């Protein structure tokens, strides 16, 4: 685009311009460019794997776990290296924006295990919001039933958040005197991890894609043939692909990291 090689409807495009692949004629060096079909993958991220498209140090990334990639996709949100669970990978930028932007308050559910017994007072503090070391206070959350394992002195509970700050869960619990032993994201918006084994990825079903787009308040396209979720929806208006991890949706000055708590 900086070289003036991209045009939309015959006009040279500049950085920041938008285009709708369904309506606009997009060309590169005068030749038409067709949009990639939308692709949606659900991954059960294991520990010790980075949530990024590539790593300069050659460490394992979530992209290594997605088979048969025919379209360029990126992870939506972020789980830190030691966290596990549900991760969506897609090339649908508007769905990513809808899931990550703080104004949407899209729920994310985590199964958390901490050292020690999580008291009623600490649970209520998590629900009201915890003041972090940087002076920011987290939004209200929901703490599920707590189960204390006396033999190992650990407490496991579910935690539902509607905002994301960098390493929010670990920072909040550290401030309450608890070290996180294990952190697994089990739900994000309408998507559920279910019984997908750790380290495995699968395409979303057409039903899941439809639910995801309804959740994102987007108009869906024609139904896909059974078993092929990649063609479940038409390409949607392009507003620029978020960078790896969905960082382009970060709200300036909000103190929030829409990539998710990440642990």
Image (tube, rainbow, N blue to C red):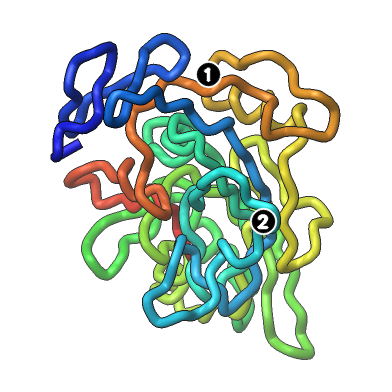
Tell me: 14 left or right of 20: left
Please tell me whether mark 2 sits on a helix, a strand or a loop: strand
Q: Which residue is mark 1?
A: 218
Which of 170/37 is in front?
37
Tell me: 212 left or right of 170: right
* Horizontal and vertical percent position of residue 27: 33, 24
Quarter in which the N terminus is drawn: top left
Residue sitting at 75 percent across and 23 percent down?
Answer: 224
Q: Is residue 116 above or below residue 230?
A: below
Residue sitting at 59 percent across and 25 percent down?
Answer: 213
Residue sitting at 48 percent across and 28 percent down?
Answer: 35
Q: Is residue 229 above or below residue 67?
A: above
Tell me: 64 left or right of 255: right
Which of 160/263 is in front?
263
Please tell me whether mark 1 sits on a helix, a strand or a loop: loop
Which of 222/178 is in front?
222
Tell me: 93 left or right of 36: left
Label 2 CA crowd tier, 10 Å (few <14, some 14–19, many 20+)? many
Q: Quadrant of residue 167?
A: bottom left
Q: Earlier in the sequence, mark 2 or mark 1?
A: 2
Q: Quadrant of residue 33?
A: top left
Q: Which residue is mark 2?
A: 43
Q: Is residue 131 above or below residue 41?
A: below
């Amino acid at each position: 685009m900086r070289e003036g090689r991209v045009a939309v409807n015959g006009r040279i495009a500049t950085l920041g311009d938008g285009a709708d692949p369904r309506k606009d004629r997009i060309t590169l060096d005068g030749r038409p460019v067709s949009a990639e079909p939308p692709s949606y993958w659900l991954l059960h991220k294991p520990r010790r794997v980075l949530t990024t498209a590539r790593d300069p140090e050659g460490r394992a990334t979530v992209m290594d776990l997605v088979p048969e990639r025919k379209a360029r996709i990126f992870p939506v949100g972020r789980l830190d290296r030691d966290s596990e669970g549900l991760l969506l990978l897609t090339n649908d930028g508007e769905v990513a924006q809808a899931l990550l932007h703080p104004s949407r308050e899209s729920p994310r559910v985590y199964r958390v295990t901490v050292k020690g017994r999580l008291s009623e007072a600490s649970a209520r503090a998590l629900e009201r919001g915890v003041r972090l070391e940087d002076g920011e206070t987290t939004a209200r959350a929901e703490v599920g039933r707590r189960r204390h394992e006396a033999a190992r002195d650990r407490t496991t509970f579910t935690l539902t958040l509607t905002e994301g700050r960098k390493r929010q869960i670990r920072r909040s619990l550290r401030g309450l005197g608890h070290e996180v032993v294990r952190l697994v994201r089990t739900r994000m918006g309408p998507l559920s991890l279910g019984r997908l084994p750790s380290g495995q990825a699968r395409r979303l079903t057409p039903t899941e894609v439809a639910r995801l787009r309804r959740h994102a308040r987007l108009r869906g396209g024609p139904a896909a043939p059974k078993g092929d979720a990649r063609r479940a929806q038409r390409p949607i208006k392009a507003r620029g692909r978020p960078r790896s991890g969905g960082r382009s949706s970060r709200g300036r000055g909000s103190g929030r990291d829409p990539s998710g708590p990440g642990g």
